Structure formats: structure tokens, C-alpha cells
Image: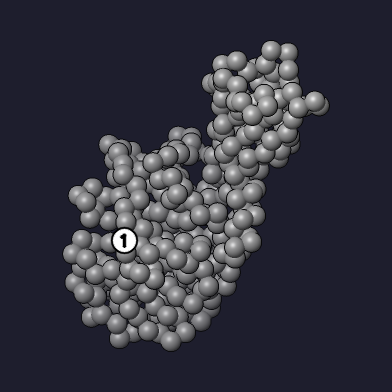
Amino acid sequence: MPVGRAILLIGLLWGCGETAAPGGTLAVSVTGRLERGSLVVVQARSGTEPLPDTSVTWSAQPSDGVEFPSPGRALLVRATRVNLTATASGATGSLGFDVAVPPTIVFDMLRDGNRDIYRAALDGGDLTRLTTDPADDVRPTAANSTVVFVSYRDGRGALYAVPLAGGSDQRLVVTAGDESDPALSPDGRRLAYVESSSGVPKLWLADADGGNAARATSGSGFPSSIEVGPTWAPAGDRVAFVATAYGNAGLFQLLTGAGAISPLTADSTPDVEPAWSTDGGRIAFASERNGATNVYLLQVASGSVSQLSTGPGTDGEPAWLGDGRLVYVNWIDGVPRLCWLDPAAPDSVHAIDVGPGAAAHPKGVL
């Protein structure tokens, strides 16, 4: 991501603004993500001195746009223009800012006995069901206003596409074996997926509409080595995936132009479910390197690996958002929930409430 664009995103998402009432009576500041569903820190100051949170009374316009659950905290309820006012000892100050809609994710969810593809905002709002077939629809990927997913309505795994805005779905690739694990390139023009006509899952590449489909890894590994879980680098020139070419599940990368394949990790502990960051520098993946299954980060250039999530429970199925956050699944006592975290502050985990049902396989919308 270009530096200027990164700074712009920080300015938009991590607002820290302030203004003073006439005469400089009170200055008001807000720190946090200025998006719907975010709990932000609000503070009033008289001169250079911050006032105790319990001494300040807060109000907002519109009144239903913000809630104040505790002193010094504001919950941004609606995506709208907001004006906050602080009052203390007869003095006032105010601050106006725009509350944005959070990023969009897609995922599959088992609800009322059927697993379908859904779309929602990161705070769980704007939930929309995209598929309704009685068969299971799973593992979505989204780019360029299109969602590609796996459906079992044909008696085996088959790839379908549906508009992100909703509408009719259509069959894509038609091959002899099961199709699974679709991954759209960031520009929405190419599709990586897994096909098993040989009896063993192997990595294939195709156009986004399923045309020009061909195996991508001929000559790699051995006939029975498994290849799954593709994910694209943001430039669209490389695909990372999981393979057992060395006997154990590890991460590999394919240069899509040259066809060259090289290992990314070669540890004795299986590494699975890779997700390439939108800045190109990192790959998130799931592993049980420390005994429990958690999300880890691979620095692509150096090969160094660090643990990102720490539980409780089991963490997996990571996916990146365009602003650098990660969405993933956390299982506690076998019950899944969608969560997100910022790798810059991984100890702060945010649950995504999408209502009743078992949600899985989240993806950010590219």
C-alpha cells in the first residue's frame, strides 16, 4: 500500500480530532475507529488539563447515533454525521465527525438446518443472505462485486458465483472431480481453486468466469501429495497454498507467470489456511506450533514466524481486510464465532455478532 494511502486510511479510521468552544472553554477529543459499532475514547479538557471522566456529561446529535455506556467511552451506533457535546461545570465543547460503515465480509453460516452464503458488515450489521439452495453452500471468496463459493447441489463440490449485492447464482468451472477452496485474485480477474479429478486435490487456475481452467502445479510434489487452501498475493503474480509435497502440510508459493514453486514454511508442525495480507508482506495462517491451534504471521521476505492470536479456544480460518485487520473464527467448546483483531494490537479481540447460527470461512471483500 502506498505510504500516502496508508496515512489517509489512518486519518479516516483512527480519528483523533478536537475543537474548542468559543473562548477556548472546553476542548473535545475522540480516539478510536470512527466506524459503526466502534467503542471510542472521548475526553474533554479545560485548557491543557484533561477533566475527570466522571465530571463530564456527554450528549450527541443525532441522539440515537451514539451511546455512552461508561464514563469516557462512546459507542458509535449509526453510520452518520455525529456531533458530540461535552458539558462540565457550565462549560461546553463540541466535535463533529463522520461515522463510517465498517468493512464488508462474506462467510458461510449454518442456520435453520441449512448452510448458505451471507454478507455482513464487520460489526455484524447489514446481514444479507446471498444463497438459498437446500444443499450446502460454503467457502466464499469475494472480489470485484462477485462472490464465488462451493455448492453441493450437484451431488459433489462445484463452483458457483453470485453478485455481492445479491441475485441469481451461476455455475462456473465444469470439471470431472470435486471443486473446492476458491480464491479470487484481488482484481477479480483470476480464480485459484482445488480440483480432484485425479483422486487427489490439486491446485488449478482459471479465469474468474471459469474459462481457461488448467492445473497450476504439474510436476510438483508427488502424485498423492495434497494441495489445498490457495490465497493470492495482492499483485496477482503469486499464489500461496498448502501442500504435503515434503510429507507434512506446509505453505508453498507459486509464481503464476513462471510456474515456479518454492516452500514458505517447512516445519514439522502442519501449517494450514494461509491468507496473504493486502500489503503483500505477510501471510496469516493457522498452526498448532505451541500446542493449541492459533493464528500465526509469516513475514514473507524474511521467513520469520510469530504467533498472533492467543485464545482462549481454537483460532483458525484467518482472512485479511483491506485496512490491515484480520477476521477469523474462534471456537470455544466446539462453538464457532467470528472475530476480528488488529495485528498492531492483537490482545484486543472483537466478536462479530451475526445472530444465531454457526458461521465459518470468513473472507474480506476485496
Quadrant location, the C terminus: bottom right
Image coords of residue 216 (percent x, y): 40, 80
Residue behind mark 1:
305
Relative horizontal placement of residue 288, taking residue 348 as reference (left or right): left
Question: At 24% across and 53% down in the image, what residue appears?
Answer: 288
- Front residue of 139 and 86: 86
Q: Residue furthest top?
A: 89
Query: Horizontal placement of 81 versus 109: left or right?
Result: right
Where, quadrant-wise, is the N terminus in this rendering? bottom right
The one nearer the camera, 350 or 59, is 59
Q: Please name the residue shown 35% across and 69% down the image.
A: 302
Q: Residue furthest right?
A: 22
Quick check: can you spot residue 19?
yes
Q: Observer-nearest residue: 176 or 240? A: 240
Q: Position of residue 289 (x, y in %)?
A: 22, 55
What percent of the width, then of the height, locates residue 207? 53, 76
Describe residue 202's horizontal placement relative to residue 80 as left or right.
left
- Quadrant housing residue 51: top right
Q: Give the camera-side residue of 296 and 64.
A: 296
Picture layout, residue 79 above or below residue 54: below
In this rendering, does residue 178 appear at all? no
Q: Residues within 10 Å of mark 1 (few under 14, many from 20)?
A: some
Identity of the residue drawn at 57% across and 20% down: 53
Rendered image coloring scheme: one colour
Q: Position of residue 2 (x, y in %)?
A: 59, 65
Q: Secondary structure at mark 1?
A: strand
Residue 15 sits above or below residue 304 on the image? above
Q: Looking at the picture, does residue 71 appear above or below residue 147?
A: above
**Residue at (65%, 48%) from the top-left corner?**
12
Q: Quadrant of residue 47?
A: top right
